Amino acid sequence: MFESAELGHTIDKAQYAAEVPGLRAELLDAQFDLREAASFAMVILVNGVDAAGKGETVNLLNEWLDPRHIVIRAFDEPTSEERERPPMWRFWRSLPPKGRIGILFGNWYEGPINARVGKRLKETRLDQHLDEINRFEAMLTRENVLLLKLWFHLSKDKQKARLNKFEADPKLRWRVTETDWRNYKRYDRRHNVAEHVLRHTSTSQAPWIIIDGSDPRYRALLVGRTVLAALRKRLDVGAQWQPRLSAAPMPPRLDSRTVVGELVLDQPLDKRSYARELEALQGRLALLTRSKAFAQRSLVLVFEGMDAAGKGGAIRRVTAALDTRQYHVVPIGAPTEEERAQPYLWRFWRHVPRRGKGVIFDRSWYGRVLVERVEGFCTEADWMRAYEEINAFEDSLIDAGAVVVKFWLAISDAEQLARFEARAEAPHKRFKITDEDWRNRERWPDYERAVADMIDRTSTERAPWTLVEADNKRFARIKILRTICERLAVALD
């Protein structure tokens, strides 16, 4: 894969001096058009061989472009805060919003490559990482991210010559570290691992571009022209650009039976039994979340359900058992302007808890396959691919030690109507009922279908849905608390 990058491409000073002014002007124009359109973000990944000019090239891009609208991030070893969350968390937090350019050093490729070179990762596990990366990058491109992946290359002899040159110059000696020489000694192994990684992750939507790093002028012009061409191609398409994705047809339903429809929604539980069980379960939950074992885990609770199903009341009974310093509740509504400028899952990744903490989502990422599907806020292809993306997201949480517990609170049409009317009449509850709630009742059959599909496609062995019969609020709250305690007890054992 690296043969063309070892030919020794060069650009003479005169040609370089002649081309740079026009290139800079075109890049600035394209960056301005990107900011004006604000319809996509550009992410440039910078990887490659030590001393191949990665840093110099990025500094040059920062000089040629308007630095106020560029996000540059360099990733070293994960911090303690980052190690307590899924590996991709720190990269999600660094994605640029629409209208801006992000340049990421030491990105999601660096860790797997270094681990494989250092023999801390078997090839089969490396390939699993690469599959996860391919899915992540496919999701980014479908969420209007223009992804440009640059690999800066040097032959072994040229890398050695470059390192020796830096060491011999007192002004540049600081740039050469023991790690650089250690990596040089493992050049052949790194070369083989890099070739394997690039071959597995150079996809149609995000191919690798290999840069010959031996000549600074050639390297700079090639990167500048590559960035400009990618930007212009996307800008010229404009609002008509769509990811190449179509949705397979949903299977027809031959009857009206669903897993939610088969529930007996009005389950009995008297007040005395409720009070007794509530106290016992809240006490058990308090002990579980304060145990030493929980300090190595985290808790992610997801509450979904029809309007007025009792999510808020159930959440209050859960939080009554928790230390207020230990959790936070995230109510999810329509995305803000900041959130709309990012890929769909970004606003949920930003709330992922560290170890020993919990987060409670009052509605969640399932909005993509529920309200956005039913109301037509996204395309069929978007919500169809969301099932896979959601399952992958939850797997990432679980792999990092999170206990993920998901609840669907189910109520009958008649019970919802009764609760709506009660809210409308009670002065202290009127804020809970809106015209939108009344309108949503007209879409009840559409939501039932969406809920059934959601459960079928996202109730996994690692993160199953718990269906809660919620016509009786007391029964629902006890079932929720009991489920959380049981799932935590198993995870902490």
Image (spheres, rainbow, N blue to C red):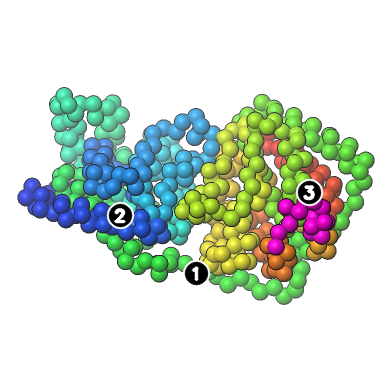
Which is nearer the N-term, disc 2 or disc 1? 2
Q: Residue at x 59, y 33 (%)?
A: 355
- Residue 428 is tagged as 3
Q: In front of the other: label 3 or label 1?
A: 3
Which mark sits nearer the N-terminus, 3 or 1? 1
User: Which residue appears at 79% of the width and 32% of the height?
Assistant: 283
The disc at residue 31 is: 2
The answer to whether 12 is drawn above or below residue 380 in the figure is above
| Label 1 packing within 10 angstroms: few (<14), some (14-19), many (20+) | few
Element type where label 1 sits in the image: loop
Of the 4 image quadrants, the one containing the C terminus is top right
As rendered, which of 490 and 437 lies closer to the eye? 437
Residue most extreme to the front: 427
Provide the residue span drawn in magenta.
Answer: 420-435
Q: Is residue 32 highlighted in magenta?
A: no
> Tag 3 or tag 2, which sits nearer the N-term?
2
Q: Are marks 2 and 3 in contact (CB under 8 Å)?
A: no
Locate residue 434 relative to residue 102 in the image: left or right: right
Callout 1 amino acid: Ser
Q: Amino acid at mark 3?
A: His
Residue 191 visible in rendering: no
Q: Quadrant of residue 122?
A: top left
The residue wearing badge 1 is 246
Alpha-carbon span between mark 2 and mark 1: 31 Å
Which residue is painted at 30% across and 63% down in the image? 233
Q: Position of residue 317 (x, y in %)?
A: 77, 40
77 vs 130: above or below: above
